[in-house]
Structures are given as C-alpha cells and as structure tokens.
C-alpha cells in the first residue's frame, strides 16, 4: 500500500473509532431516563414523548447544519446540549423535567445525520454498508450499558432514593463529555473540506433547492413512510418491554430487565449481517431486502404469543429475533439506503428527513403504548406490530417495484476524503 493509502486508512480508522465512541456516549444519555425520574408508565410516556418530539425536530435542523456548515461541529454541538440538559436533570424539580428532556432530545437529534454525513463522505459505496453494520454496535451496546448502569446505580447508590438528586444523570453526562472530547481530539486535524458541487448536482449551501430535492424524491418519501412504522415499533419495544414482562407475563423487575436487554444485546448480529448481505447480493435491491425483513418481522410478531408461552427460552428467542430484524432493517433503510441513493452534498438533509419522519413515530410510541394497552391489553400490542410490519413491507415492495420500473440513477460518485466537510 502506498504512503497516501496508509494515511487514508489511518484517517478512516480514527474517524470510525471516534464516531463509535461518541455515539455510544450519546445513547448512554438517551436511555438513562427509564426508572430514575419516572414515577410510573404515564410519567415515563410524557418524558419519552417530549424527548421524541424534540429528537424529530432536531433531525431536520441537524441535517441542514451538517450539509450547510460542518458535520463535525454539528455533532459536537448536539453533545454539548445533551450534556447540559442531562446534568441539569440530576437536580431538576419535577416541573422542569419535561423541558430538560425536550432539550436533551434536541441535542441528541444532531448526532445521527451529522455522523452519517461523515460516513457517507469518508467511506466508499462498496465498503460503506459493511462499515456501518459494525459501527451500529456503538448505539446497541450504548443502550445496553445505559440500562445496566442505571439499574446498578438505583440498586447500590445511597442517593438513588434521595429527593431531588439522581446520580445516574451525573454519570451519564460525564461519560458523554469524555466521549465528545475524545471525538473532538481525534477529528481535529483530519482534512477539512470543500463541498463537491459537481458531484452533488446541488450546492450543500443552497438550502431551499436542497430541501425541495429531498422532499420531492420519491425514494425518500417511500423510505420515510415505512420508517415511520418501523421506528414506532422499535421504540415501543425498546422502552416498554420491561413493563410488558412485569405486567403481562409476571416477571420480577430484575428478570424483566435482564430478559428485555436481549432485544438489544442479542440483536447486534442483525445490522452486521445486513452490511455483508447488501454488499454481496443486494447492492441495487435494498428495497426488496427491506420488504423481506419486514415480512419476516410480521411473522415473528405473529408467533410471539406461542413462543412466549413456551417458557423463558421461547421468550428470549422471540425478543432476540425481533431485535435483530428491527435493528437490521432500521440501519438498512435509514442509513445504508439513503446514503446510497442521494448525492453526498445532500446526505445530512436526506438522513435528517428520513429519521425525522421516523422520529415522529418514535414520539408517538409512548402514547400508543399507554393508550393501546389500556384498552386492549399487552398481548394485543404484538398484533399491532404485525400490522405495522406488514404495512412497512408493502411500502417497501411498492418502492422496489417503482425503482425497477423507473430505474432512477443511483449515486455512484465517491468523494475523496479531502472533499469531506468536517
């Protein structure tokens, strides 16, 4: 390998490591709310709804800032906002909690479009999917660590039951601060850039034309529509599985927490496998793969009562398979496919648009869980997931047929790292 090739590989390794560490830190500040300030399901639902609404809004803002100014500064700004709001939650009075969760969600929303913008520019099409699959372990493990850390602090900290102070937020904000400083240091001297207007077709600074291009793109409309239902399902399970296991199945709180963690920790294989599968067999047929995964998810959700009723092992198998399919399809559609179909100068806005639409579903999921369960019970919730998965699969199937029929030109350009707008 040439000296220039070695330097490029070193830069990419640094960016991957720094982005991995930082986004794990983001998730530690995202998933530590459950069980700390929440008095019950209704309170938790209100917090998650405020967080999700701000997160959805921030996707659009963060995507615009990443394309227009700097992806690196955008993600660091989001980290700072999240740190300030999270550390304030440690002493926050009850009346300020929802406001601070809104601020935390807004800061968190900057992370995804900005980091995907960097991955889209620094890694070539032929290797990007595989790299993203491995990078997804950051937020899966980050969420698992956050849940475990919160549970440990509540069980062992003398402050956990104290009025007005919650040490989990202090620890989480410190972790995110350390990871943000690490990212800032590792990315400080990477080559800064100039927008590649010729390859993109649209200047990254032209906001109006840029958003018109994204909003009018049929592929983005289809991905956004299916992702709305997929992300609603993902976040309902992510935050409400322990409540389901305690209220409906009769698990203890400790057993429910351990069992629910399988939804995340055992799903790591999903995105990693998808990265290799797309690269080898589905490079130009990503919509078809997404549809197939949604139909498989519908089948698993349909079988869930049978699997769960067979005992603890059946419950683990069902939850883990759901997690692998959901996390794999999530990254495939909201990350890999968007970056593949959209010019690099528009990656921030495109990722922000798709994830913003999906995050509206995330914001609705707490209300969906509380209202639906209150009327129909926990067991019927999985019937609703069957419907959502089938609907998402039909949308992807329509997108695959449309893509085959119209044969739109896909983004095949590869920006050199010197064109990256850090």
Image: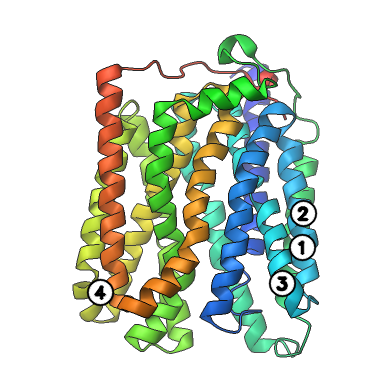
Give percent across and percent down for residue 279: 37, 31
Mark with earlier residue (4, 3)? 3
Distance from Cα at disc 4 to Cα at disc 3: 38 Å
Closer to the observer: label 1 or label 4?
1
Query: Residue 62: x and y, percent?
Result: 67, 40
Residue depth check, mark 2 versus mark 3: number of the one nearer the observer: 3
- Do the CB atoms of the residues marked 2 and 1 lie less than 8 Å apart? yes
Q: Residues within 10 Å of mark 2 (few under 14, many from 20)?
A: some
Q: Answer above or below: position of 301 versus 244.
A: above
Q: Which residue is mark 1?
A: 85
252 sits left or right of 186 in the view: left
Per the image, label 2 sits on a secondary structure element best described as helix
Visible residue check, residue 340 = yes
Residue 81, numbered label: 2
On-image quarter of the C terminus = top right
Do the CB atoms of the residues marked 2 and 3 lie less than 8 Å apart?
no
Residue 360 x %, y %: 51, 52
Closer to the eye: label 4 or 3? 3
């Amino acid at each position: 390998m040439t000296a220039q090739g070695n330097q490029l590989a070193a830069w990419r390794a640094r960016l991957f490591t720094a982005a991995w560490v930082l986004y794990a830190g983001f998730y530690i500040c995202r998933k530590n709310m459950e069980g700390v300030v929440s008095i019950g399901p209704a309170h938790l639902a209100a917090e998650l709804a405020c967080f999700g609404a701000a997160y959805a809004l921030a996707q659009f803002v963060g995507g615009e800032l990443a394309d227009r100014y700097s992806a690196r500064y955008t993600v660091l700004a989001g980290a700072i906002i999240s740190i300030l709001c999270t550390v304030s939650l440690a002493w926050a009075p009850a009346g300020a909690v929802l406001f601070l969760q809104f601020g935390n969600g807004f800061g968190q929303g900057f992370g995804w479009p900005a980091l995907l913008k960097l991955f889209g520019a620094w890694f070539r099409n032929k290797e990007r999917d595989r790299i993203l699959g491995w990078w997804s372990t950051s937020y899966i493990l980050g969420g698992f660590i956050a849940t475990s850390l919160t549970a440990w602090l509540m069980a062992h900290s003398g402050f956990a039951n104290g009025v007005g102070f919650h040490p989990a937020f202090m620890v989480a904000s410190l972790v995110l601060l350390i990871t943000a400083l690490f990212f800032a240091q590792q990315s400080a001297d990477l080559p800064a850039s100039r927008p590649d207007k010729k390859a993109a077709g649209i200047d990254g600074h032209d906001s109006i034309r840029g958003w018109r291009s994204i909003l009018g793109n049929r592929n983005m409309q289809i991905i956004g529509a299916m992702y709305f239902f997929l992300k609603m399902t993902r976040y309902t399970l992510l935050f409400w599985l322990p409540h389901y296991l305690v209220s409906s199945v009769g698990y203890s709180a400790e057993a429910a927490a351990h069992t629910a963690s399988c939804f995340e920790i055992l799903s790591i294989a999903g995105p990693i496998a998808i990265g290799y599968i797309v690269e080898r067999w589905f490079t130009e047929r990503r919509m078809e793969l997404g549809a197939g995964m949604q139909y498989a998810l519908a089948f698993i959700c349909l079988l869930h009562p049978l699997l769960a009723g067979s005992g603890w092992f059946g419950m683990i198998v069902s939850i883990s398979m759901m997690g692998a399919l959901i996390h794999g399809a999530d990254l495939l559609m909201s990350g890999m496919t968007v970056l593949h179909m959209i010019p690099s100068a528009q990656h921030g806005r495109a990722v922000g648009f798709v994830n913003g639409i999906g995050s509206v579903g995330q914001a609705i999921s707490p209300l969906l869980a509380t209202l639906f369960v209150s009327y129909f019970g926990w067991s019927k919730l999985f019937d609703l997931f069957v419907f959502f998965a089938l609907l998402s699969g039909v949308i992807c199937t329509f997108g695959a047929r449309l893509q085959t029929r119209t044969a739109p030109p896909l983004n095949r350009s590869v920006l050199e790292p010197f064109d990256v707008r850090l």
